[in-house]
Amino acid sequence: QVQLVESGGGLVQAGGSLKLSCSTSGSISSIRQMAWYRQNPGEQRELVASITSGGRTSYADSVLGRFTISRDNAKNTVYLQMNNLKPEDTAVYYCKVINIWFNDYWGQGTQVSVSS
């Protein structure tokens, strides 16, 4: 059974930093892409950042220049370094993994709260 476990969320003041981690376990096959999404109640889940197996990254315009996604292929772990956090970054952050068969897996989410 595949499991994704996020960690690193919390409460921080505006301008602060947090680093999220997402570790995978189980038989996931080779990973094609890893990504971070976020969601607030009543809103659609939005893509924050993604990274391919080759290291190509993509970011939402709202976080470009502030967030950095990275991955450790040997550990099947993805990270999200979040700097200069803003109150509008407050959300539950979810990790998503897509394997080479285009199966996707989600973590349980970790809360990030940014106070003004």
Image: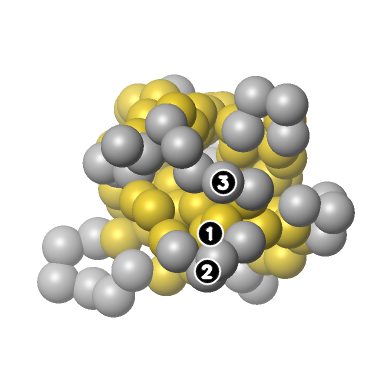
Evaluate if marks 1 and 2 touch, with contact meaning CB atoms under 8 Å apart: yes
Q: Is residue 76 above or below residue 100?
A: above
Question: Residue 84's x, y, as percent?
Answer: 62, 41
The quarter of the displayed image where residue 81 is located: top right
Question: Residue 89's x, y, as percent?
Answer: 44, 52
Say which amino acid is labelled 2. Phe
* Residue marked by disc 1: 98
Q: Is residue 44 left or right of residue 86?
A: left
Residue at 35% x, 51% y: name it.
106
* Residue marked by disc 3: 29
Is residue 65 visible in this depiction of the protein? Answer: no
Question: Residue 57's x, y, as percent?
Answer: 77, 59
Say which amino acid is labelled 1. Ile
Residue at 28% x, 75% y: name it.
44
- Which quadrant is home to the N terminus? top left
Residue at 82% x, 59% y: name it.
56
Q: Of helix, strand and loop, which one carries label 2?
A: loop
Front residue (pair 32, 56) = 32
Q: Residues within 10 Å of mark 2 (few under 14, many from 20)?
A: few
Q: In this view, does 59 lie above or below 86?
A: below
* Residue marked by disc 2: 102
- Which quadrant is home to the C terminus? top left
Q: In this view, does 53 lie to the left or right of 87?
A: right
Question: Residue 5's x, y, as percent?
Answer: 37, 30
Say which amino acid is labelled 3. Ser
